[in-house]
Amino acid sequence: MTTDPPIRVRGLAKSYGPVEVLRGVDFDVARGSVFALLGANGAGKTTTVRILATLLRADAGTATVNGFDVATRAAGVRESISLTGQFAAVDDILSGQENLVLVARLRHLDDPGAVADDLLARFSLTDAAERRVSTYSGGMRRRLDIAMSLVGDPPVIFLDEPTAGLDPEGRVEVWRTVEELAEHGTTVLLTTQYLEEAERLADLIAILHEGRIIAHGTLTDLRRLFPPPTTEYVEKQPTLEDVFLAIVGGAKERG
């Protein structure tokens, strides 16, 4: 196994006409870690992911994924990665199991049924395996989408805004899934505009603003950029998300 980071980006630049979307982006992602690329809409997060996934060519700079240059060895990159976009790429007509079996067959894996069963169990979807995906909740659809992206055990996975459009309960489901990916040693590059998502999941955070990385480091590193906090004694109220999840969880237990 190479000691080089599985994702390395240097001087990445991309423009659309006069609009500079990326203006010299640099970062490394350590093996088996979760790296969060944080930024507002239009900051360049999706463009970065599309370049790393060989779906878009950079104007300048270099990038390697799993040791393969994205510009000159695209086939090697594609064999090493999986990409989950902002919208679940699942077939609503098929069942969860059929979706997974289809991807396993497309990847020419032995025993697609066993591959599907293993991933259904891993993502707590066994009970819904034979149901049409059209009956799944948003969180279940996203978990299935991520499970499909792991068919063949790619060492690197890109999650582009994986919780966009999900309700609070669905977001928590996806967060647990990402944590499990890291526990299994998968290298994850996660793009998000949700601060609490990056805070909970990421080993390292980079803030992308107007096409540049303006800050990066661990959460502790980034907190050091601000003045020391003052100590105040206040009553901590639960957030609306805390209340929502507690109420929904209690209703499920009573039901």
Image: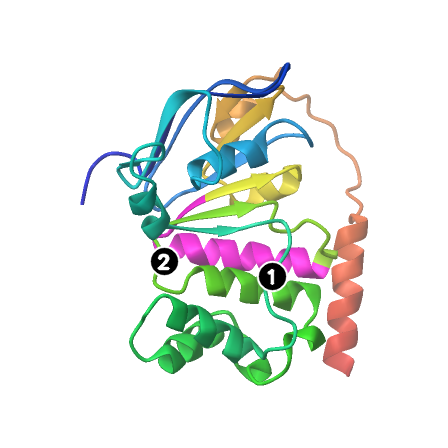
For badge 2, the amino acid type reads: His
Say whether residue 211 is visible: no
| Residue identifier under label 1 | 142
Position of residue 196 measured from the top left corner of the image (x, y, whole percent): 64, 41
In the image, residue 214 sits, relative to residue 248, either above or below, namely above
Position of residue 159 measured from the top left corner of the image (x, y, whole percent): 52, 47
- For the point 39% across and 20% down, the residue is 61
Left or right: where 154 falls relative to 212: left
Region of the chain picked out in magenta, as a range = 169-188
Q: Residue furthest left?
A: 1
Left or right: where 182 falls relative to 165: left
- Asked if the stretch drawn in magenta spans residue 40, the answer is no
- Asked if the stretch drawn in magenta spans residue 178, the answer is yes
For badge 1, the amino acid type reads: Arg
Mark 2 residue element: loop
Mark 1 residue element: helix
Position of residue 199 measured from the top left corner of the image (x, y, whole percent): 58, 39
| Residue identifier under label 2 | 184
Quadrant in the picture for residue 15: top right
Quadrant in the picture for residue 3: top left
